[in-house]
Each structure stands twice: as C-alpha cells, then as structure tokens.
Amino acid sequence: MKKRTHLCGTIRKAHIGMEATIKGWVQRRRDLGGVIFIDLRDKSGICQVVFDLANMSKEDFEVAEHLRNEYVIEISGLIEERSEDTINAAIPTGEVDVRAKRLTIYSEAKNTPFRVGESSHIKEELRLKYRYLDLRAPEMLQHLMLRQTITTSVRSYLQSIGCLEVETPILTKSTPEGARDFLVPSRLSKGQFYALPQSPQIYKQLLMVSGVDRYFQVAKCFRDEDLRADRQLEFTQVDMEFSFVDAEDIIEILEELFQKIMQETKGIKIDLPMRRMTYREAMDCYGFDKPDLRFGMPMVDLTDFMAEVNFSVFSKVLHSGGIIKALNVPGGQSFTRSQIEYLTERAVFHGGNGMAWIALDETGAPQSILTKYFTEEQMRDLISMMEAKPGDLILFSADSPEKARYVLGSLRLDIGDLMGLRKKDHFAFVVVTEFPLFEYDQAARRYVAMHHPFTSPVDEDKPLFETSPDQMRAKAYDIVLNGIELGSGSIRIHDRDLQAKMFETLGFSERQIESRFGFMLNAFEYGVPPHGGFAFGLDRLVMMLAGVDSIREVIAFPKMRDGSCAMMDAPSEVDPDQLEELSIYLHSAYESEKKKQAMDLSVIEYVSDLAKIALTIAEKISFTSDLESIIAFADQMATMDLMAVTAGDIVETGSNRFRADVPVKAITLSDALKNAPEVQADCFFVPKTVE
C-alpha cells in the first residue's frame, strides 16, 4: 500500500506537475470509449481522475472499465491542468485532474439503496438504516466537523478561564423528578437498579463541595421521553459549574463563550452584552419564555384600554378575567385574502376562536368590521398605542391570559415565516432571567420546580415560602437563540436548611428526602461554597449553526422518532439466560403478545424491498400480523377435506344490497407519499435497481 500524498479535495493548480497518490470512493464514472473519467471522493471533497491507455497498462485500464460507484480505490498519477473548456467551476478542484498511471481496488461495493450525496428526498428510516452510507455525503461530514469545531472551541475557552474537565459516572442513582430515567438492573444487587444520568447535576455540585472550584464536561445524558426534531433519548450536553459566583458572573462567561463559538464557526462577531429580558417580559411581549428576536412585532397589552370599547366579544372575555393582546404587523395590509384566511386557520389551530384584525390602508384609514365598535378618538388612541402606520395590520387575541399570549405569540412566529423574517443565517441571542421558582402541577396537586430542586430563590422572595410559593422567582437564567432554548442554569442552594425548605415545599416526605438526596444533604454539612452553573445542548447548537431542522442530521448515529435504531435493530430482545441472571422475569401478557409476533419481520422487509415500498417499524409489525393471520387461515383450510365439495356448494343465495355512499376525507399529499422510497417533485419515485 502506497502512502497517500494528497486528499482529493485539496488538489489545486499549485500542484500541477506533481505525482500524486490519492485514495477514496468512486462517486461517479463516465466511460467515453478509450477514456474513462471518474470522480473520486474522500472526506475533503472530490477530484476528477482520467484513465487512458496512453498513460497506464492495459491490465489496469481493463480494471478501470469495471469500476462502479462506491468502490474503494487507490490512484497514482500526474496532476494536470484541465483545458479551458473542461474546467468545472462548481468544485474547488475543477481546474485540475489526475492522469492515472496505476490503479488498485481495495474493495468492491454492491449497488447502494440510494445514491450517496443525493439523499435529501430519501425516507429518513432508509437513511438511518444505512447511516454509514448517509454519512459519506459531504454535507453530513461537514456537520460532524462543525460539531468538532464547536467542542474544541468550548474546551479551549473553559480551560483558559481555569475550568477542570472532570468525567462523572454514567451508572448513578435514580432520583425521579422530571423526565423518566433509563434504568439499568444490577446483577450484583438483585432487584436494584442504576439510572443513566439525565444530567450530571448532583455530581457537579458535589465537585464544588470538593473544592474543584471550576468544572466542565462534554457529557452524555439520557432521558426517556418522547422524541421530536430537537430531542433524542441520548444527547450531548456541555456542562459547567463555578464556585464563588453570582448569576451575572456566569452570564458574562457564557456571553464570551458563545461569542467565541460564533466567531470560530460562522465568522460572526456577536455584540456584548447580550440582550437581557425577564421571564415576565418575554411572556408578555412574545408569548413564550424563549422569544425569537430575529424580528420585532412585540405584543401589546390592551386589556385596560379595551374595557372602554363597546365590543361585546372583548367585554365578555374581560368580565371572565381574560386579557386582550394585540400585534402590529408592518406592511400586513398587503396580505392577500388567502393569507388572511391561512392566519385565521393558524389561530384556530393554536387554540383561538378566530382572528380579529384591523388593517390601515395607504392613507392610514382603518379597514375592518371592528371599526364600528370604536369611537374616532378610541381608534386614534389604538393606532397610537400600537405604533401602527399606513399599510400595517393589527391583530387581536382575547382569551384567558395563558391562551391569549400563546395564540398571538404563535401567530407572530407564523407571520415571521410568512414574511421571510426568520432567516437561518441570522442569529439573535437573548438571556432570559427571573423564572418562577415553582409551578403548580394540577395532576399531582403539588408544586414542582420549574428548573430543578437545587435552584436558589431570589433573596427578597424567600419570605414567600410560607404564603405565596407561586410568586417566588428563581436565580435562574436561559440562553435563547432564534426562539430555541440552548440551555439553562441557575445559582444553586448552598444552605442545608434552605435546601430542606425547598424539598418540603415540593411535597417530599422526610423519607423521600433521605432516600433520594440524603447523600447530598450530608455533604452540605461539611462546608459548601456559593456556586452556580449552566448546561447547554451541543446537538441543538450544532443543528442551528448547520442550518438544519433536526438534530438527527448532526448526530452520527441517532435514534428514529420511535426511539429505535434501524441500523442496529435496537432495542431488541435478549437471551433468556441474561434475564434470568438479572432476576428479571417478563410478564405473561408480554410473552403471549410476543408469540403472536413470532414471524420474523424480515419476511415483510423482503416483500417491501421487492415492491420498493418504504415501511415504518409499526407498519412492518402490523403487516406481519396480517400475514400471519392469512397463513393461519390457509393452514386451517388445508386441514379440511374439500375433495367432495363442488363449486355450487359454496355459493350463497341472496338478494342485492345497496350501501349508502359515505364521503371520506381526502388524505394529504404527505400521507399519500409516506411509503415512497423516494419523493421527487411530489411524486412517488422508484429508484433504478440496476445502473
């Protein structure tokens, strides 16, 4: 094996005349009869290789004639300048090619289930099943490299300010509060379980008790919760904790850290300090505690003003304790009728009863059925309060405080999308502070911590423990980017008595406190420094900086929406001996269900592959069950003696019956195409099986 001299994507005009040995995968092959061109790909990019008999042996040329996509090969040859009419300006190596002299095939490849680098229309399940092929795409490799750049930047900065990187245990104690734990049975302690950490929260606080002073870790965390585009069962968290700090100290560290990350990954300088906003301001102005500030349009509270307006719909809401919020959309008067109808539908989708609006024409005159309920003076005051100008559109939401904020805040985001204001290459950070310390869980009939039970209350709110816990504020802070919470942190409780009071307010009994957190309270008896910290999701940040819509695009081997891994076929059953060794015995109902699904899913997978139909795991299980029923019926028929039965014996006499037609709602385009192996131009596309 010869040493590689160049990466494919690094060859330039400066290398013309040099001998090169390059290695990689065949991306594309073109045989022009006597001359063969291939695009050779490695992690750095693509370069063109030319085979012709004038420069290589007949034996090597014959081998080149049999090259196919994704063969792994080695090429040795001369770097040459392309003629002017063959220059490919679309790729960095487009001014040169490699004139091959020798060819070595390391390994051949079967026809791939999809073309590498062209997977944007391929069903995600298929991509994840063949993730090792999907990761060969240049954009996927770029995502992994971006992830490494961010991680390197984080480590560099935190080490520069004196943080010590410490690994904390993966097998830990279950402390049920928040998301469900993943449990791991102990073989050595029968009937007892470890939990996989949802975060290193307790360990990092104990490190502060240990005198580490400043800690960080790029930590693997686990939460057994429903998946979505920005959530996985296992995820990576950048975790940090600091002693002898207040909230402002930590926020300043975070500002400098994210400024460094943005500079080194996107070449963007973030102005400091970041914008600050309290939880209450975020909810009142934007409807969410993670506001998207890439565009304006804050909500305005009109509750007091509308009390004087003679409009029965608004009056009814106000009399029932509701509020009225409004939103001014600059230039919104130009919305078409269909766009107004779309926004009305979205308002209903978000839980509203419709959408009331007033448009201002080019002269500034109001246009709406609502105008008759306002006096001229009230209309002028409304326009002034909303800072509306000619051509603007004012939207209203009247409902309970929570619903009015949510509906109009959601509409604001819909309008941002409609007007192209939420650009992925624009980044708006904001620090949200003063979150509520508690929120009330109606189902559990008790208070729960909005962040976690170790968050310190604002000093002046401590007397409210006894009277109004729901009014208490936390020394907590979130970093929000483009309407997505990157991470959260808080100043922790370092006083044992205050921590016990927190547990008491959360409704924990003495036994529960001792069982779940006794070790921590014991540690607090040996001297605890004031401390606080922060953690942010690495996957989520990489997703946003990469400009993609799902963290599955930036994790090497993610789980699918149902938590399964199509590539590894996990989760899966285990050997009964392993379960017995752990003293785990499955419920009889489960065993009965398992027997019903005895047929291997590979049968359905084989049929779906022949038919070029993509199936989800749930569909595979359902169709397997149907197939088993058909086979069982056939087996039953096989046991019957039908030799003496004639065709007339099984004809049933009867009369015609007519059923009433029942219209069925048309399915959506996405539902119609959900089983397509590939979608192109909104059509069911079946890829070629043979090139």
Image: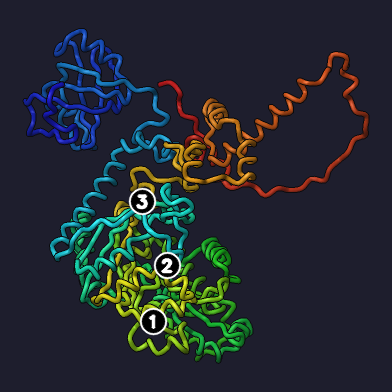
| Disc 3 residue type (three-letter) | Val
Q: Is residue 551 above or below residue 301?
A: above
Picture residue at 26% right of the left edge, 44% below the top: 142
10 Å neighbourhood of mark 1: few (<14), some, or many (≥20)? many
10 Å neighbourhood of mark 3: few (<14), some, or many (≥20)? some
Camera-nearest label, 1 or 3: 1
Q: Which residue is mark 2?
A: 516
Residue 207: x, y in percent? Answer: 25, 66
Marks 3 and 2, how far apart in space?
Answer: 39 Å
Q: Quadrant of residue 465?
A: bottom left
Q: Quadrant of the C terminus?
A: top left
Residue 569: x, y in percent? Answer: 46, 37
- Taking the image as drawn, is residue 124 in sight? no
Left/right of residue 406 with respect to residue 204 in the rendered view: right
Q: Quadrant of residue 490?
A: bottom left
Element marked by disc 2: helix
